[in-house]
Amino acid sequence: MYKLDQTQTPLFDALMEYVNKETIPFHVPGHKKGVGVDEEFKKFIGENPFKIDVTVFKSVDSLHHPTGAIKKAQQLAADAYGSDAAFFSIHGTSGAIQAMVMSAVKAGEKIIIPRNVHKSITAGIILSGAIPVYMQPALDKKVGIAHGVTPETVEETLKKNPDAKAVLIINPTYYGVATDIKKIADIVHSYDIPLIVDEAHGPHLGFNEKLPTSAMEAGADICAQSTHKIIGALTQCSLLQVRSNRIDINRVQQILSLLQTTSPSYILMASLDCARRQIALSGKELLDKTIELSNYARQEINKIPGFYCFGDEILGNDGVFALDPTKITITCRDLGITGYDLDMILSNKYHIQLELSDLYNVLAVGSFGDTEYSINALINALKEISKQYYGKGNKKSDFIDIPSIPKQIKIPREAFNGNKTPVPLKESIGMISGEFLMAYPPGIPILCPGEEITKEIIDYVQMLKNTGLYVQGTEDPEVEIIKVVK
């Protein structure tokens, strides 16, 4: 299956060699293997992490010019995922996505993207100076979320924009919904341009046949993966996988070097090295258990009055080609409460913290770290909440229409860097936004820099705020003022 020995962890081994030699440090960081760290913090963390918190020197290699342990670790990651090259990203998948966009398109070139992109994609477009062309994803009116874009939508958009230089899709979505990525890859490649994939929520897909097809398996040219989301890497750890036919691997390395810190965390990189080994060697068995527990949770939650967890019954709907069962979307509108309400109840009363909430749903993420105890704790809490609320409130409406994609007056980079002036949001109708507006999580833009502000958008933002959802993007933390382009 693999060409390389996936039992190896070259970077972690190099760090262990440094520790075992009891090297005396005269290098940064200044805590010097933890000796200079605040005692209370060290007592909680333990001493070992500080011992491998080192800086760039020959035996542990350099992320910006890898020739040794990091180079070998990245080669192992590429082998595990079936790519031509893999790069460590220790500034999260957001940074990897920015590098991915900048590697594929340049200033003035068109890139086709779904509207429900994470803000990091728009950030990459601003940095690159590219021109976004938006596709509308399929919308599920029952649960009020966006699914994937269909192959038909991709094909139609390419026909209208044959001069586009790349197509980007999200697969799977935050909620675990996958589109027909193989078909989309074939369509995009028929135009001889690269398919870019935001695979933030799919670093585990290639390691169990019960999961949707991974980007690399489908023939994508470059994809970014959040290895900290499902598999066992630390927060902020991600991978960027590349195929070389339509993407210049050397350019990817150069752009990552522009974006990433020159003092990368070796703790984070070591966790990436070891997480790759874990998923490569034990991924199928670990995912079998994760999928089994997640499906058990889905089945039990669907028995509770007022709750609904979508599953295989939505396969075949627009934008729903496959599902990742480890994502458990719990719809609570039949209880007469919002997803935000449910999130707060679970957090404050039951000390259960979920991944995100929106108007109708909360999202529970299944992973290697789940146990029968933790899954049953969630189920039992939902049973109690059902008894308290079911039949006592008004069922929430099926769907609140998301505002139409506003007209793009200026490209995002021009608007973001242009001369701006603050105005009250309620008085900004018809003006050009110089800022983002989004509900976060999951960070999907309602308004991007360069777009015309509409009454529909202002009303939608107010509704989100009224329901307690977190709206952000403007410099004003209360989102009462927005900066517009003069």
Image: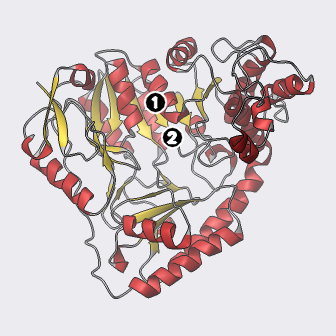
Pick whichever of labels 2 and 1 is earlier in the sequence: 2
Q: Is residue 191 visible?
A: yes
38 horizontally vs 222: left or right: right
Query: To which quarter of the image does residue 435 belong?
Result: top left
Tell me which colouring the rendered structure shows: secondary structure
Nearer to me, 441 or 284: 441
User: Which numbered dot is residue 182?
Assistant: 2
Nearer to me, 450 or 15: 15
Nearer to me, 163 or 424: 424
Q: Nearer the viewer, mark 2 or mark 1?
A: 1
Nearer to me, 141 or 306: 306
Q: Position of residue 40 (x, y in %)?
A: 70, 44
233 horizontally vs 173: left or right: right
Tally of numbered tags: 2
Structural distance between the alpha carbons of marks 2 and 1: 10 Å
Are dots 2 and 1 in contact, CB under 8 Å?
no
Q: In the structure shown, which secondary structural element does the residue marked by tag 2 occupy?
A: helix
Q: Position of residue 266 (x, y in %)?
A: 70, 27
User: For the point 38% across and 64% down, which residue is it?
Assistant: 340
User: For the point 65% across and 44% down, which residue is it?
Assistant: 206
Quarter of the rendering occupied by the C terminus: top left
User: Which numbered dot is residue 195?
Assistant: 1
Q: Residues within 10 Å of mark 1 (few under 14, many from 20)?
A: many
Q: Position of residue 149 (x, y in %)?
A: 37, 46
Say if 251 sits above or below 479 in the image.
above
60 horizontally vs 240: left or right: right
Q: Position of residue 376 (x, y in %)?
A: 64, 75
